Image (cartoon, helix red, strand yellow):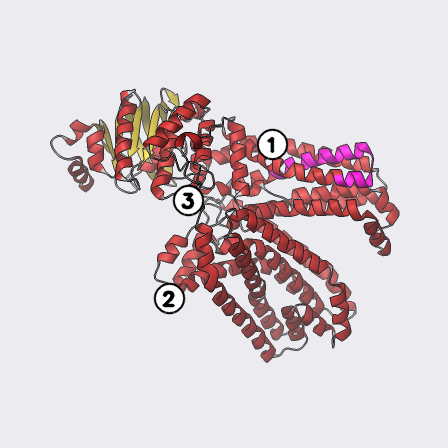
Amino acid sequence: MKKLVSLIKASMTSGMNVFKINSKASSKRKVLPLFIAFWLMFTIWSNANIILEKLDRVGLEYIALSIFVVGISMFTLIEGIYKSGTLIFNCKDDQLLLSLPIKKSTVLFVRIFKFYVFELIFNSLFLVPVIMAYLRWAKADMFFFLTSFIMILFLPIIPIVVSCIIGAITTGLSSRFKYKNFFQIILTMLIFIGVMYVSMNMDKFLIDLVQNAKGLNDIISKIYYPAGVYADLVVKFDITKLLVFMLINIALLVVGIFVLSKVYFKINTRMKSVVTSRKVKSSKCIEVKVKSQTWALIKKEFSTFFNTPVFIINAGFGLVLYLILAISVFVKFNLIVDTIKSTDIISIDLFLKNLSTYNFLIIILVLLTTSITSSMISLEGRNFNILKSFPVKTEEILKSKLYASLIITIPLVIIGDFLIFIRLQFGILEFLLILLETVIFSILSGLIGLIINLRYPKLDFENSAEIVKQSVSSFVSVAIGLLGVFISFFIISSLIEKGTAPLMIMGVGIGIALILDLVLYLYLMKKGVEQFNKLNV
Amino acid sequence: MLEIKNVTKKYGDKKAIDNVSFTVNDGDIFAFIGHNGAGKTTLIKSIVGIHDFDEGDILIDGKSIKTDPVECKKLMAFVPDNPETYEHMKAIDYVNFICDMYEIDKETREANIKRYAELFEMEDKLNDTIDSYSHGMKQKIVLISALVHNPKILIMDEPFVGLDPKAVHDIKEILNELVKEGKIVFYSTHILDVAEKICSRVAIIKNGKLIKSGDMKDIKGDKSLEKVFLELEER
């Protein structure tokens, strides 16, 4: 037990402190992430209040808790699926930990525990404001607090265990191939598409569920067991039910670790094995290609990107979703129109009149939440010293990172732009503005990511998922992107309602983004360069 | 010529390098020795432009690393204490990448890659990704990358760690060749008997301060370098 505690302590201090920016980080730098965390919590609290207000009228406030539990668990599961493969396999401290006189399952437990603690913090950011909002609308006794506390502690377990098992399956299968990373990306993407397909085709299941359910709590329980237990316990506290819930979670965790430990080390060893080329004569294998400094640096960024599955999946997810949306619009636009007609979210005339503006808004959402550059400095890791020793201006290094992100992002979005334009056939000028928007907002997203990553670098890490998914930089970049999306959504919605012409809305939007691009570029070339030069491993 | 002029580097209040000055002339193999944590790596990183420093200056052929870093770096090659590379790259791609950074023309890089790959017996392994390499092989790739662009000054931090005896022997030969061409080799090491044999000059650092610097024969006199070093350390 002592060993386990020491191991957890060492492991947590080395990698889990999300606010450990670097050893010289000033307290001023901690203000922005903390502010964003509070802003996020406030936003959730506000939204929870809106839902609770409606539920209060029918006396079903506790349903709000279940809704958020289902939502956050789903989110943890989806995130966990593509993080787990990287977080638990092929860590930098493998050699150290596996050489210590400790059980291999203990090493696995520590990895999963670290994953759990991060998700616990993340889940708390969502659940604590919901619980606080609930207290405004409903009476709560000490059992409510006890139940909520236990729920916060235990809710991450099921999604984590499930995602670790899925992560082990994808990693295990891909480890059998020469191009492990490629297969891991494909398998993970297939799982995502499968999850999305199933969740979009649950109508029959839900109808059956409602018809055969004994009550509302029964429906929630059948959708997601912990959400149902939470609702039950809030309505009527039952210690046995709580204990059963805790035992089921603990049992699942133990069984999960037991099952994983059977294959974990086999997969880990296979992941580390690298297929080497056939031996060929020296003169034939020396292939010399001369490139410019900038192009060589861009190629290096591609190499890092395409060799880091979690990086590709994280960055590519929004882009792939946009492509799927574009294909859906291209193939089934009439169905989308029929669906909108059947709901009263928006008038169909307004929708058809502003198609290009909605496309414009969706591109803002996709690009501002796709933050490739927010991990690019951190992912240099120990190689940061090599980079600094090159006879290359810092400006060029930063530009190459920006160019690489643009080359990855822009073509995919433009393919989507074309598909949507061909099907919807809005004016050529509107289409040109959409293309311009794709470029300008890709630059904006890239600049924000680089500036944030230079402000919150983390060059010491155990695996890439810590940087891509769990670093302050990625958190702050996505939050700033989301803030930009909210502001754009609010302004554009108001302008649409006022009947402003799409061309005007897009023109103004692009103009503002262009000014932001210029300001941020100048900032990056001055302050960013200084921060880069001061940084070292 | 490499000139270290009153260089001071602080981490907070602690001086990692305290007013260090010395000069390394063209054609010198210069050993930089000191106990663990004495400040060797900090000074080396300052020389190659990885670390900034608080006071003084470092001149590479008369150019300051502070004000003219790109021109200074063009003249140098750096071999770090750990063989840090972009491990997901093929070795040949990595070496090419380094050549691109130093803007080496096709003919020179072709000849040099071939020369050093053969010397380090790596020619049939260049098409493998670096993550498949052993520590020693990675170190060889770092050395090939450092030598391939014909640096005027070779800066190395513990270059012999992890290398097989033949590779160590070959490196010593290469270092001798480089200095015959008037180039500078500056390296930190704990292997004092090797330093004693191949280095013309030496500097000893203790707790960030330079405690001895000069010609190898003057510093050690009739004693071994190890004995001199231990005596200085005990003071």
Q: Quadrant of residue A249?
A: bottom right
| Residue shown at the point (21%, 37%) measured from the top left | B192
Looking at this view, name the residue that lies furthest to the right. A349
Q: Nearer the viewer, mark 3 or mark 1?
A: 3
Mark carried by residue B155 = none
Q: Which residue is mark 1?
A: A521
Image position, residue A53 (x, y; %):
75, 64
Which residues are the magenta region? A419-447
Looking at the image, is mark 1 or mark 2 earlier in the sequence?
Answer: 2
- Badge 1: chain ID: A
Q: Is residue A383 visible?
A: yes
Query: Which secondary structure lies at badge 3?
Result: helix
Q: Amino acid at mark 2?
A: Lys
Q: CA distance from mark 1 to mark 2?
A: 51 Å
Mark carried by residue A2 = 2
Report the side of A39 relative to A356 (left or right): left
The 10 Å Cα crowd at callout 1, few under 14, some 14 to 19, many 20 or more, is: many
Q: Amino acid at mark 3?
A: Ser
Mark carried by residue B132 = 3
Q: Is residue B74 visible?
A: no
- Residues tagged by mark 3 and mark 1 found on one chain of the structure: no
Image position, residue A150 (x, y; %):
57, 70
- Badge 3: chain ID: B
Query: Which secondary structure lies at badge 2?
Result: helix
- Residues tagged by mark 3 and mark 2 found on one chain of the structure: no
The correct choice, above or below, for A326 with respect to A175 in the image is: above
Report the side of B211 relative to A92 (left or right): left
